[in-house]
Image: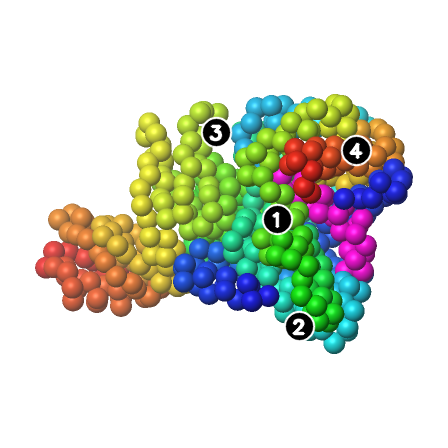
Amino acid sequence: MIGTGTSERARVQIDSQAREWQLKIQRGSLQADEMEEFGHWMAIPAHSQAYADCEWSTACIRELDQQQDMQWSAWKDEAMERATSGAPKVEPLANWSDLVFSTTPRDRRGAGEGFLKPMLAAAASLAMLTMGVAWHRAVPGNALHYQAGEATRDVLLPDGTRLTLDAGTAVDYMKVGDTRRLMLPAGRVYLAVAKDPHHARFVVQSGQVETVVLGTRFQVSQQSDRTEVVLEEGRVRMQRPGTEQFTTLAPGERGWWANDATGFGRSAATPSSAMAWTRGRLMFEDTSLADAIIDVNRYSKHLKIELVDPRVAQLKVNGSYVAGDPELVVAAWEATMPVHARHEGNRILISHD
Amino acid sequence: MADGHVNLEALAEAGLAGQVVGQDMEAWLRQLRPALTAFLRRKLQDPADLHDALQETSLRAWTYASRCEVRAPVSVCFRIAEHVAIDFARAHMRAPPAGPQDEVDLLATDEPGPERSASATQTLELVKRVIGGLPPGCRHVFLLSRSNGLSNPEIARRCGVSVKLVEKQISRALRELREQSKEWEGGTP
């Protein structure tokens, strides 16, 4: 406890210093000598107490932010209103503008591995939704565009979030206000979402569905009318913007939505196999041959497999294959399943044995 | 100090439940190392203890993180370092501790410190109640700072008040929180 001898003015000053240290530490921007200075500062009991109060209350507030509490949201809205009405003009906040307008992701390597790890693991804090209002207000052209070619591509977003884009997948990312938004028109992306120092929510928008990040590692795929999410670690919520429909996934679960569906589907999944593509492997577990072919073709630009016999479409495929070599995959299938392959130019035609 | 070792073994036996949290704590310890070194240098009576004290701090922090959910990792590390320094000082006096109920012993590894002792839900309820009881202006500023992550000058600019007032209001909110959580926990900080 800060001693009774500490004057009001001194205490205000110490609280402000504590907050400054906290923000610097969260950003991971401290050099070794600054860290040392922080250690000296903390050696004074009134300082370490102020820091503890600061850190503890921030953590509590972050948790309250995550709960869907009407009263709490009302207070936050009130505060936001106060902040915007008191401002002479509305403009992006200084510390947001570099994220929104920069075209080259900020180099975070300087921050060191030891810093990124807790950032990723402690990850995002989100709950209340504004149904993409911020997105519509956004000026086009500020978004960062990332596209993967024939192979998967790793992307580091300006906020430290790591993406793995599946072959042929393109996404747009932008941060507006307190929402980080990733648009996934089609394809598949794996995400390790970084914690944002300002608690900005991270939303993946795909098809008719928004996936709001409550945790860390997951993938979203959008194929024709179907959105599918597999969660590896943490928590995510899938929701239909403008409706009350949502589902919250736990690690090891798969959630999906099809455009003609009346509700979200959920089932158990094996994240390691579902995400094998991020390691250059294709892994199938009782996948229909038709679906497996779609996956294999995604990694092959010139040589495409085609199913010419509907009788074999529902055969079950199992096992792990190297992505990008359809000939090898087909050879393995011929050896283990009642199928026959015929090469015709750039196509491999699959029929019943 | 032996306590730390026992707990590590028990943890290993119990499985990897705390592993992820433990790794987080490791990362924090790596990041904070220069700060903890400077801190311990000031707290230790014998500079030769520095290396051991750092080790001991890491071990206890890791054990602590494996057992409890850590809300305030930075404060926990320093709190633990503080107690490690006290333990080293006591070892140098070659005197047995004052008694098993000695306050510092209780604080050694189990003490929640900045985590406070109440359950997570109770704590959040309390924080919510305290914040709800603040004058609106004070509550706005505090939420803009802690929930929206705005800097003090930013809040001042946007709300059209002075930075000094923003600082004062944040400090006031913190004071309410620290006083009420103390009162509510029966006077044990």
- Please tell me in which quadrant of the rendered image residue B81 appears: bottom right
Q: Amino acid at mark 4?
A: Arg
Q: Amino acid at mark 2?
A: Asp
Left/right of residue A14 with respect to residue B129 in the rendered view: right
Q: Which mark is residue B52?
A: 2
Judge the density around disc 1: few (<14), some (14-19), many (≥20) Cα neighbours within 10 Å: some
Which stretch is magenta?
A: A39-61
Please give the name of the residue rendered at 41% of the width and 59% of the height, measured from the top-left corner: B14
Q: Label 3's element? A: loop
Residue A262 falls inside the magenta stretch = no
Query: Are discs 1 and 2 both within one chain?
Result: yes
Q: Which residue is mark 4?
A: B172
Q: Which residue is mark 3?
A: A241
Say which chain tag 3 marks.
Answer: A
Q: CA distance from mark 3 to mark 4?
A: 39 Å
Q: CA distance from mark 2 to mark 3?
A: 55 Å
Q: Which residue is mark 1?
A: B112
Q: Label 1's element? A: loop
